[in-house]
Image (tube, rainbow, N blue to C red):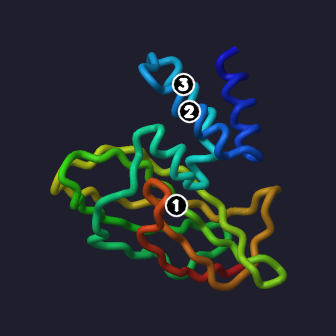
């Protein structure tokens, strides 16, 4: 039943972003664990979109950090292969901060524009002065819901709705 409520609220959030963000603020006051999970699931589209109020309601403020390193490890990817990139973040915050780290792949379309697709990566808490490094592999393979085009693509890393770093790679067929 709770999952159904969360799914319906997520659907509503696509048309009424601020309404669901404010609902999240109200529902999270002294919320038990089950209600917190419901609100997190209900706000998943808002989180992927970087909606500031929804992120703040869930305890994720603007990231206070530096990007120590970002590098696309596979500057050329063949269709069916994997994009690989690495990232190292360092906290400059005065207290521990919660982070939702996602990445966005900007796929070119036939008309020359690009279509961004957000992918979930990780949640973590970064202590004051700490650094966190990670490598991500992302499969670029044919799927029924996307048509790939050769050429330059872009990958960006986003934390708590803020773009931190990005780089390009070439897709070959």
Please state the horizontal and vertical placement of residue 171, each as a whole percent of the image. Answer: 64, 79
- Going 65% across and 18% down the picture, which residue do you hit? 2
Tell me the SS state at disc 3.
Answer: helix
Say whether disc 3 or disc 1 marks the residue closer to the N-terminus: 3
Neighbours of disc 3 within 10 Å: few (<14), some (14-19), many (20+): some
Please state the horizontal and vertical placement of residue 85, each as a whole percent of the image. Answer: 44, 68
Neighbours of disc 2 within 10 Å: few (<14), some (14-19), many (20+): many
Q: Which residue is mark 1?
A: 103
Distance from disc 2 to disc 1, alpha carbons, whole Å, reads 24 Å
Q: Is residue 75 above or below residue 4?
A: below
Distance from disc 3 to disc 1, alpha carbons, whole Å, reads 28 Å
Please state the horizontal and vertical placement of residue 124, each as a whole percent of the image. Answer: 35, 44
Task: State the image quarter where residue 105 is shown.
Answer: bottom right
Say whether disc 2 or disc 1 marks the residue closer to the N-terminus: 2
Quadrant where the N terminus is found in the figure: top right
Please state the horizontal and vertical placement of residue 136, each as a whole percent of the image. Answer: 44, 59
Q: Foreground residue, 149 or 8?
A: 8
Q: Which residue is mark 3?
A: 27
Tell me the SS state at disc 1.
Answer: strand
- Going 71% across and 76% down the picture, which residue do you hit? 114
Q: Is residue 86 left or right of residue 26?
A: left
Q: Foreground residue, 24 or 107?
A: 24
Q: Is residue 33 above or below residue 121?
A: above
Mark 3 or 1: in front is 3
Q: Is residue 68 above or below residue 113?
A: above
- Going 58% across and 25% down the picture, which residue do you hit? 38
- Going 26% across and 71% down the picture, which residue do you hit? 68
Q: Which residue is mark 2?
A: 24
Q: Are marks 3 and 2 in contact (CB under 8 Å)?
A: yes
């Amino acid at each position: 039943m709770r999952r159904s409520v969360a799914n319906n609220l997520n659907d509503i959030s696509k048309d009424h972003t601020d309404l669901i963000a404010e609902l999240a603020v109200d529902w999270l006051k002294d919320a038990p664990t089950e209600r917190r999970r419901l609100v997190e699931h209900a706000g998943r589209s808002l989180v992927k979109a970087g909606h500031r109020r929804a992120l703040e309601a869930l305890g994720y403020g603007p990231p206070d950090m530096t990007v120590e390193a970002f590098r696309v490890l596979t500057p050329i990817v063949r269709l069916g292969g994997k994009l690989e990139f690495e990232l190292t973040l360092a906290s400059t915050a005065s207290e521990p901060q919660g982070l939702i780290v996602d990445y966005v792949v900007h796929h070119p379309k036939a008309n020359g524009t690009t279509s961004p697709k957000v992918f979930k990566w990780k949640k973590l808490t970064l202590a004051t002065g700490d650094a966190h490094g990670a490598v991500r592999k992302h499969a670029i393979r044919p799927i029924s819901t996307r048509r790939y085009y050769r050429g330059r693509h872009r990958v960006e890393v986003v934390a708590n709705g803020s773009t931190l770093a990005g780089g390009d790679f070439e897709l070959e067929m």
